[in-house]
Amino acid sequence: DKDRLSGEDTSEGLTAVISIKHGDPQFEGQTKTKLGNSEVRQIVDRVFAELFERFLYENPQVARVIVEKGIMASHARIAAKKAREVTRRKSALDISSLPGKLADCSSKNPEESEIFLVEGDSAGGSTKSGRYSRTQAILPLRGKIL
């Protein structure tokens, strides 16, 4: 569900320094900043989860701050997604270079949406005022429609 907190939401802004000693460390990537030994990763994940859970239980104020920041990050993620969708939708209309000025409907469901092609801006203006804007779009065209 998009309204749920993700792991990235709750870990955003958190930093942990973990020191381990390993006889044959394998690192990932060009910068060598991430340990690639899967057996070590599993142990570190388990131990860290146990210790972090205990820390949060013993420090409820810190846990509350982390949860609040996670909720804010979730809201920001959802708002950014909506803004991207609006931008994509607007740019899709711009790219298609539709003639005239499209008065789009608010529905995204093509099965319930309809478009009315009208001749000229004057016909488009009166049609726009009498339409059901949720499902009806108006596209005034110039010249004769063939």
Image (tube, helix red, strand yellow):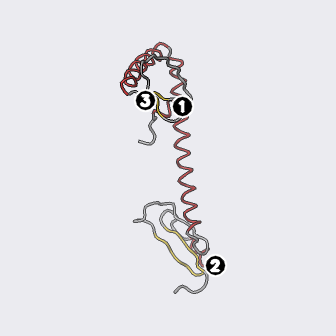
User: SS at mark 2?
Assistant: helix
The answer to which of marks 3 and 1 sits earlier in the sequence is: 1
Residue at figure coordinates x 53%, y 53% from the top left:
85
- Residue at the front extreme of this rendering: 24
Q: Cβ–Cβ below 8 Å for labels 1 and 2?
A: no
The answer to which of marks 1 and 2 sits earlier in the sequence is: 1
The answer to which of marks 3 and 2 sits earlier in the sequence is: 3
Please provide percent x and percent y for residue 67. Answer: 50, 27
Amino acid marked by disc 1? Glu
Badge 3 crowding class, 10 Å Cα cut-off, few under 14, some 14 to 19, many 20 or more, is some
Q: Which numbered tag is attached to residue 36? A: 3
**Disc 3/disc 2 C-alpha distance (Å):** 67 Å
Q: Which numbered tag is attached to residue 122? A: 2
**Disc 3/disc 1 C-alpha distance (Å):** 22 Å
- Please give the residue where the numbered disc 1 appears in the rendered image: 12
Residue at figure coordinates x 49%, y 62% from the top left:
134
User: SS at mark 3?
Assistant: loop
